[in-house]
Image (cartoon, rainbow, N blue to C red):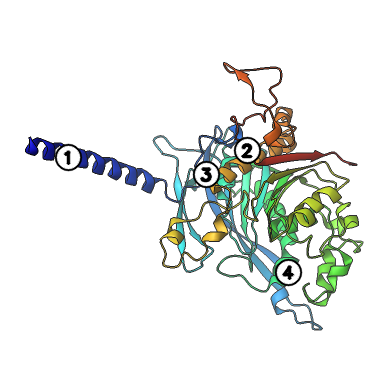
Amino acid sequence: MTHFRSAAKATNSMILAGMFLMSSVASHAQINRIDIIRPDAPALAEYGEYNVGVRTLTLVDEGRVDILNTERGGDVAIYDRSLTVEVWYPANLASGQERGGQYQAITRNPAITATLYGRAVRDADPDPSVSDLPLVVISHGYPGNRYLMSHLGENLASKGFVTVSIDHTDSTYDDAQAFQSTLYNRPLDQRFVIESMSRLAADESSFLLGLLDANNTGVLGYSMGGYGLVNNLGGGYSDDIVGSFMAPPNGLLDAHATGNAEYRAKLDSRIRAGFAVAPWGMERGFWREQDLAGIEVPTFYLAGSNDTVAGYENGVRAIYKAAVNSDRYLLTFKNAGHNAGAPYPVPREIIDSETGEGAGHYTDPVWDTVRMNNIMDHFATAYFSYHLKDDEGMLKYLDVVADGAEAIYHMNNGVPEKDHNYWPGFEENSAVGLKLEHLAKGE
């Protein structure tokens, strides 16, 4: 009897060990994936119908002002500014070729490089069945890099967009330089990349030939990317900030200021929609209400109500309210901080490091990162599809009961009852904690 019990215990131990091993293998397979879709993700977070390809390009803007080597009171230095970009696009995979690949991404702790796993295939051929696709430019924060929102780059490409994510020189994890460079260069980098992509789309030697239509462009900017985006949408910087000690030397920020008569003439009319995630600068005096009234391009703002970096009531929400000459939305993650939506989950290489330095850059104290990614991808899909693909069916995902906690979920065997007004695409209770407001132009 004793022997039987021992054998049974041993068998159970082996089963448990096997289950643990399988669980460990499964967990290991999920390490650093940027393409996870949670069971409670909203409908448009799912990947689209296209396979995805990815390529890395280097773009050089000749004759840019060199902020780092321009001294206060001295001559303006000029240099050729190099930007590395990641481009995702609908792809045509060879017979038997499996989707998926990896990225070597320097992290918030520059001593650590993470291996990220996604669905894109490196250097795959473009899908010949598509052409003249909308362009979406992705612009990271300070510091950051082109992989920080790679989940969105892949996701949108699977739905028939060409997405390009920028490594902003002097702003990346491993080359962050004086902040004045970012303040001056961010709007210019975004516009230069749009122009570069437009030229490549007409270049017979480029894989992008005919693939995209840069006249139909959206820009998504996070933090300092949002700072540059708001300026490119028509929100000129305050004339009062141009001569401040925080600003670049010799009044160079005047190139992007409301009071400069040439500022608006240099904006890119190809930008048809903006998606500003936690845009930085309002609390620091970079805009006044009259500056933000210059925005006419439709814009979707996303923020955490506990953002202590960009600010909420006096930061992102204040921008949203003051942009009175544009149609705009504001999605609020209640109690989330500055990292709402944008960064991919904290890399395992940081978690496993001795100090865990840099982990907070990818996390939020309240919200799960993957859930936030899924929600952001859902709304970016709806917003860009509506404005860049003229898909009016996407409006149902945007015009909702403002507070998700107050929406009513009432379904009967899959059929909505009369009082059902829950956010389309969201499962029961999954919009709790979210608020989506809308102000029309003139409001």
* Disc 2 residue type (three-letter): His
Q: Earlier in the sequence, mark 4 or mark 1?
A: 1
Q: CA distance from mark 4 to mark 3?
A: 32 Å
Say whether residue 221 is left or right of residue 349: right
Tag 4 secondary structure: strand
348 lies above or below 67? above
Q: Is residue 15 visible?
A: yes
Residue designated by label 3:
53
Residue designated by label 4:
63
Quadrant of image for the N terminus? top left
User: How many C-alpha atoms fall within 10 Å of the one at disc 4: few (<14), some, or many (≥20)?
Assistant: few
**Residue 139: percent from the left, percent from the top?**
66, 55
Residue nearest the observer in this picture, 7 or 45? 7
The residue lying at 63 percent from left, 43 percent from top is 376
Tag 2 secondary structure: helix
Q: Which mark is residue 398?
A: none
Q: Nearer the viewer, mark 3 or mark 1?
A: 1
Residue designated by label 1:
9
* Disc 1 residue type (three-letter): Lys
Q: CA distance from mark 4 to mark 1?
A: 75 Å
Q: CA distance from mark 2 to mark 1?
A: 48 Å
* Disc 4 residue type (three-letter): Gly
Q: Nearer the viewer, mark 4 or mark 2?
A: 2
Q: Earlier in the sequence, mark 4 or mark 2?
A: 4
**Residue 255: percent from the left, percent from the top?**
83, 65
Residue designated by label 2:
378
**Residue 227: percent from the left, percent from the top?**
74, 58
Asked if disc 3 and disc 1 are in contact, CB closer than 8 Å, the reply is no
Residue nearest the observer in this picture, 205 or 183? 183
Asked if disc 4 and disc 2 are in contact, CB closer than 8 Å, the reply is no
* Disc 3 residue type (three-letter): Gly
